[in-house]
Image: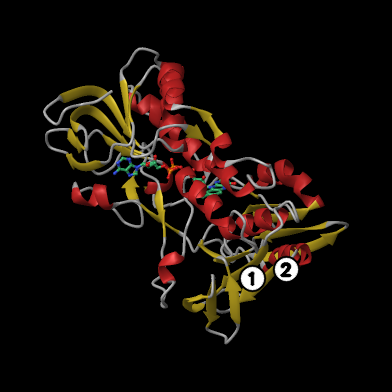
């Protein structure tokens, strides 16, 4: 559907963003109400895919476009919604409840921001610094897969969840992989040193070369490859450099509209921003002070937001939400303790794995990391954890 610049569309519920957050909240709305008009606006092509599959597609022998499980047309028909795809939203007029998009103005009764997050780009030096790529959606992943076709060597900047999962997947695809991180272990923000050591060892055995406690100084063209000069003096030659150093919630649109933002777009437990009738969820949102860029929190948020959009009063609950690290060389499930939790890690090795529990002085379980064979204890231990938001 094409909207002329002069056309003004009116829609009771408008959602911006076609990622898991946007589509999940629409599914939750449709469970409760099949009639209410919903318009989805997105700068992506609006197909549906599961983003976590991006870091396991090579081992799963999937081409990027095979990850799509619903086209724009499928999604519009299945959910009974209007979709404006490849349409950037450039402004929100809170007072008059109108958004400005590349295809015209749209007035809303309730607006949901499901804008996601951007990959952080480090300012790198060298004549090939602009060759560094990052992956945070399917289109970027498709370019990445094109870039690595017929190449052998990949360097990954960042040993967090995304960098480490890509490292494992690329090794499985026969690539030579170097991973560089300022920290002294993989998944520094999620794992205790004991669990990280297991992951580091198993991925090294699988072929990953780790470069910890250093970063990239320069990237320069070198014959038909890239020369990476690390701060610790080591030089690497690679065909492609993938940056995965972290995410920054997309807050610009909200800031321009005058909404309260902090690390993310600030929302309360009903997912309401500081502006009336404007809500946020997913990677762009900071829910009651928490930015949790994972699938489980956005699903919990979508379940609470849908009834709120339909006139009920529901607050979001976050139970303990363990994250599965998709590293088949050494699978891990982790539920890190809250930032202000007081306690200690206790690690127990077992055949083919290890269990690390973060316990308070009174022995209460506040977090865990399960490695290898210990991942079978995930459900039992998750039940013992305190909720993240009651
Ligand atoms: C490789 C990878 C692996 C992952 N694995 C896991 C995992 O195993 N487990 C887990 O829990 N989490 C995982 N995650 C995180 C998880 O995928 C994200 O938390 C989740 O997909 C975020 O969804 P979202 O809808 O909030 O954001 P996004 O998917 O980023 O969607 C944002 C949407 O907003 C649109 N948009 C933004 N600005 C505008 C604008 N101005 N106008 C119009 N449209 C706009 C974008 O086009 C996009 O459609 C992984 C992430 C990656 C990258």
Visible in this render: residue 219?
yes
**Above or below: residue 364 compared with residue 70:** below
Disc marking residue 185: 1
Judged from the image, the secondary structure of the residue bearing numbered disc 1 is loop
> In the rendering, at what x and y percent does residue 228 appear?
53, 77
Give x and y (percent) for residue 177: 65, 65
Is 25 displayed left or right of 11 in the figure? right
The residue sitting at the front extreme is 223
Q: Judge whether residue 364 can be spotted in this image.
A: no
Viewed as shown, does residue 273 lie left or right of 387? Answer: left
Please tell me which residue lies in front, 65 or 203.
65
Task: Report the number of numbered marks.
Answer: 2
Image marks 2 and 1: residues in contact by CB distance under 8 Å = yes
Classify the position of ligand 1 by quadrant: top left, top right, bottom left or bottom right.
top left
**Residue bearing mark 2:** 197
Which element carries disc 2, helix, strand or loop?
helix
Quadrant of the image occupied by residue 308? top left
């Amino acid at each position: 559907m094409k909207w002329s610049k002069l056309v003004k569309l009116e829609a009771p519920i408008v959602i911006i963003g076609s990622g898991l957050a946007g589509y999940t909240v629409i599914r939750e709305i449709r469970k409760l109400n099949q009639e209410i008009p919903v318009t989805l606006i997105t700068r992506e092509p609006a197909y549906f895919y599961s983003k976590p599959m991006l870091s396991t597609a090579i081992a799963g022998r999937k081409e990027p476009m095979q990850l799509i499980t619903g086209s724009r047309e499928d999604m519009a028909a299945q959910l009974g919604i209007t979709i404006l795809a490849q349409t950037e939203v450039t402004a929100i007029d809170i007072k008059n409840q109108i958004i400005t998009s590349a295809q015209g103005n749209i007035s809303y009764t309730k607006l949901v921001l499901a804008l996601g997050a951007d990959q952080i780009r480090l300012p790198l030096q060298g004549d090939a610094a602009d060759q560094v790529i990052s992956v945070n959606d399917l289109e970027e992943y498709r370019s990445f897969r094109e870039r690595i076709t017929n190449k052998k060597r990949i360097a990954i900047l960042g040993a967090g969840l995304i960098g480490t999962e890509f490292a494992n997947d690329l090794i499985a695809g026969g690539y030579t992989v170097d991973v560089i991180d300022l920290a002294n272990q993989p998944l520094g923000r999620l794992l205790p040193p004991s669990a990280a050591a297991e992951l580091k060892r198993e991925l090294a055995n699988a072929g990953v070369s780790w470069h910890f406690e250093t970063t990239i100084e320069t990237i320069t063209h070198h014959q038909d490859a890239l020369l990476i000069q690390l701060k610790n003096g080591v030089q690497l030659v690679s065909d492609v450099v993938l940056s995965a150093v972290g995410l920054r919630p997309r807050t610009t649109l909200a800031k321009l509209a005058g909404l309260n933002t902090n690390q993310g777009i600030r929302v309360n437990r009903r997912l309401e921003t500081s502006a009336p009738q404007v809500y946020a969820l997913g990677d762009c949102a900071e829910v009651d002070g928490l930015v949790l860029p994972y699938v489980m929190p956005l699903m919990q948020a979508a379940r609470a937001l849908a009834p709120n959009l339909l006139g009920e009063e529901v607050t979001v609950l976050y139970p303990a939400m363990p994250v599965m690290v998709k590293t088949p060389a050494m699978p891990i499930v982790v539920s890190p303790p809250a930032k202000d939790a007081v306690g200690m890690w206790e690690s127990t090795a077992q055949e083919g794995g290890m269990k690390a529990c973060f316990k308070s002085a009174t022995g209460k379980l506040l977090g865990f990391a399960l490695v290898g064979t210990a991942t079978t204890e995930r459900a039992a231990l998750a039940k013992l954890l305190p909720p993240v938001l009651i």
